Image: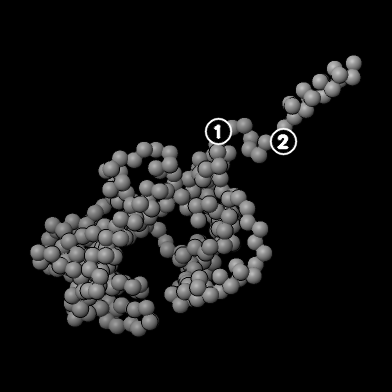
């Protein structure tokens, strides 16, 4: 009798299990942070009687970004008590769903060579080097960064940021940005459409009254003389200038993300950034 009870108890224990971490349904492959949300409106900081209804733009200077990543963050991480842990933004298959941060591409679907070459530029506008003279209108100077440049608007109304390689390392930066954009896009991250473009200088038409500000905060006119100095740093081939062309992104720029915490003014930003596997 006791042996039978022992066998029965053993069988019953074998049927026991922990509470399931995930419910019995299809894995989640789309994060809800892609859904539209409403945010509180506030007065425009510069325009009277105007309301803005989007998260507050965030700016991080080059000096602060360098100091934070080279000094403050390593120091605080050294003294912090960080137990670590698993990523939070994963589904029942321990994979990262599509979100505003990441899109499963090569991880879920095969990509052809053409898919990889097109990358983030697929299905979008491209600069036409065969356009008429003066049809690439320079409407803005590049405000900061290591490489000089300016923004142009083509005859279709599409805008692009053009950047030179500089005269010390010709072709290096433009090649690296075009290649890395396609690798990042294939891996799943959101990347801009960056390409190498060769064009004749006569395509450019400078809008009067523009200025450009360098990394030191110095602002100077972007006139014909300044444009000539800028173009002189671009590599040349058979009379054509080589520059990096980045298709202008739609929407409103809110600044860079932080590597920890969340944005309190973004209802979709609910997972602490330090706990995201895709970051």
Q: Earlier in the sequence, mark 1 or mark 2?
A: 2
The 10 Å Cα crowd at callout 2, few under 14, some 14 to 19, many 20 or more, is few
Q: Position of residue 279 (x, y in %)?
A: 50, 56
Check contact, mark 1 vs mark 2: CB within 8 A.
no
- Residue under the point 58% across and 55% down: 275
Q: In the picture provided, is 231 more to the left or to the right than 180?
A: left
Q: Position of residue 276 (x, y in %)?
A: 55, 53
The answer to whether residue 239 shows anywhere in this view is yes
Observer-nearest of 31 and 90: 90
- Residue under the point 38% across and 81% down: 217
Q: Position of residue 186 (x, y in %)?
A: 37, 47
Which quadrant would residue 231 be assigned to in this image? bottom left
197 to 64, vertically: above or below? above
Pair 1/2: label in front = 2
Q: How does the figure colour the protein chain or chains? A: one colour
The 10 Å Cα crowd at callout 1, few under 14, some 14 to 19, many 20 or more, is few
Observer-nearest of 221 and 112: 112
Residue 119 is labelled as: none
The answer to whether residue 49 shows anywhere in this view is no
Disc 2 designates what residue? 18
Disc 1 designates what residue? 26
48 to 30, vertically: above or below? below
Gap between marks 1 and 2 measured at Cα: 20 Å
The N terminus: image quadrant? top right
The tally of labels here is 2
- Residue under the point 35% across and 83% down: 218
Q: Element under label 1? A: loop
Which quadrant would residue 129 be assigned to in this image? bottom left
- Residue under the point 74% across and 26% down: 15
């Amino acid at each position: 009798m006791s042996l039978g009870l022992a066998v029965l108890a053993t069988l019953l224990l074998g049927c026991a299990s922990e509470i399931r971490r995930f419910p019995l349904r299809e894995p989640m492959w789309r994060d809800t942070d892609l859904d539209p949300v409403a945010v509180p409106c506030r007065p425009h900081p510069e325009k009277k009687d105007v309301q803005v209804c989007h998260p507050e733009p965030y700016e991080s200077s080059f000096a602060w970004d360098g100091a934070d990543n080279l000094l403050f963050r390593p120091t605080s991480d050294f003294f912090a008590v960080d137990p670590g842990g698993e990523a939070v933004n994963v589904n029942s298959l321990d994979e990262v769903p599509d979100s505003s941060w990441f899109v499963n591409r090569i991880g879920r679907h095969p990509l052809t060579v053409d898919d990889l070459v097109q990358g983030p530029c697929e299905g979008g506008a491209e600069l036409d080097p065969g356009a008429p003279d003066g049809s690439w209108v320079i409407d803005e100077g590049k405000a900061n960064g290591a490489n000089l440049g300016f923004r142009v608007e083509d005859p279709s109304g599409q805008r692009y940021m053009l950047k030179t390689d500089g005269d010390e390392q010709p072709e290096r930066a433009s090649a690296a940005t075009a290649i890395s954009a396609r690798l990042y896009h294939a891996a799943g991250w959101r990347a801009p459409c960056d390409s190498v473009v060769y064009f004749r200088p006569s395509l450019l038409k400078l809008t009067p009254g523009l200025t450009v500000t360098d990394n030191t905060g110095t602002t100077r006119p972007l006139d014909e003389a300044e444009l000539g100095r800028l173009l002189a740093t671009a590599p040349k081939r058979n009379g054509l200038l080589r520059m990096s062309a980045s298709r202008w992104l739609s929407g409103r720029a809110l600044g860079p993300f932080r590597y920890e915490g969340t944005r309190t003014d973004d209802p979709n930003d609910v997972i602490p950034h330090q706990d995201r596997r895709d970051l």
